Image (spheres, rainbow, N blue to C red):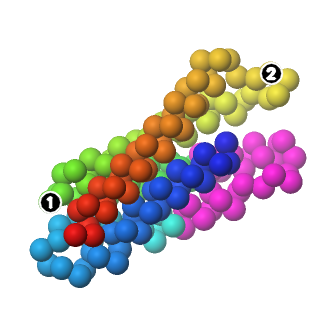
Amino acid sequence: MTTMRTATAVFVLMGLALAAPFAGADPARPKGCLVLAAATKRFEDLDNKVKALNDPEVSFDEARANTRQQVGLWRQMQDLLGEAAKNITDAPRLAAAVRENGDAIGQYADVVEEILPHTQENPPPADVRANYTAAGKRKNAAGRAMTEAAREICAK
């Protein structure tokens, strides 16, 4: 779970970071790039908090509590990206990519919440495991798509 979370966060962060250096450089560049750049700091803070909760040395109960906190942080990321997408009015493709990424992070949080009550002795059903895998793939793909949209639109 940790690798998938980290990989997706890196893709999302890359998309946000790409917009930042270029956002104010050219007045012809969409203002949506500025919106995306403004969200970068808050997203980085949330991402760092998620990463800080990844501790393989803690007990199962502590890991479960940490994961619950991560779910809350992912929800904040979803809200942040949703708000950013609403405020990107001059770059529809960028807005759609940011929105999709936020939605994918939210779906991933939903699935992780479904897994939380389970243990190694009582694993989640096959459909929940399949949903987890699909949500992780969607989250990764959405992060890559947002990165690409930011690169194409904000780094021209």
Specify whether 125 is left or right of 140: right
Q: Position of residue 107 (x, y in %)?
A: 48, 36
Query: Circle 2 sits on which residue?
Result: 122
Which segment did they paint magenta? 45-71
Q: Residue furthest top?
A: 126
Does dot 1 land on a helix, a strand or a loop? loop
Specify whether 69 is left or right of 156: right
What residue appears at the point 35 percent right and 74 percent down from the top-left corner?
Answer: 20
Which amino acid is tagged 1? Asp
Determine the main secondary structure of the stretch shown in magenta. helix
Decide whether residue 67 is among the magenta residues. yes
What residue appears at the point 12 percent right and 74 percent down from the top-left corner?
Answer: 28
Residue 54 is marked as none
Which amino acid is tagged 2? Asn
Q: Position of residue 119 (x, y in %)?
A: 80, 29
Instruction: Pick the residue in front: 131 or 60.
Output: 131
Task: Confirm or deny contact between disc 1 and disc 2 (CB under 8 A).
Answer: no
- Would you call the spot at circle 2 few (<14 residues within 10 Å), some (14-19), or many (20 or more)? few
Visible in this render: residue 82? no
What residue appears at the point 61 percent right and 36 percent down from the top-left corner?
Answer: 112
In which quarter of the view is residue 46 placed?
bottom right
Query: Circle 1 sits on which residue?
Result: 90
Q: Residue furthest left?
A: 28
Does dot 2 land on a helix, a strand or a loop? loop
On screen, 40 above or below 91?
A: below
Instruction: Pick the residue in front: 22 or 99.
Output: 22
Measured Cα–Cα span from mark 1 to mark 2:
49 Å
Instruction: Pick the residue in front: 84 or 4.
Output: 4
In which quarter of the view is residue 19 placed?
bottom left
Q: Position of residue 156 (x, y in %)?
A: 22, 69
Quick one: label 1 or label 2, which is nearer the N terminus? 1
On screen, 61 above or below 40?
A: above
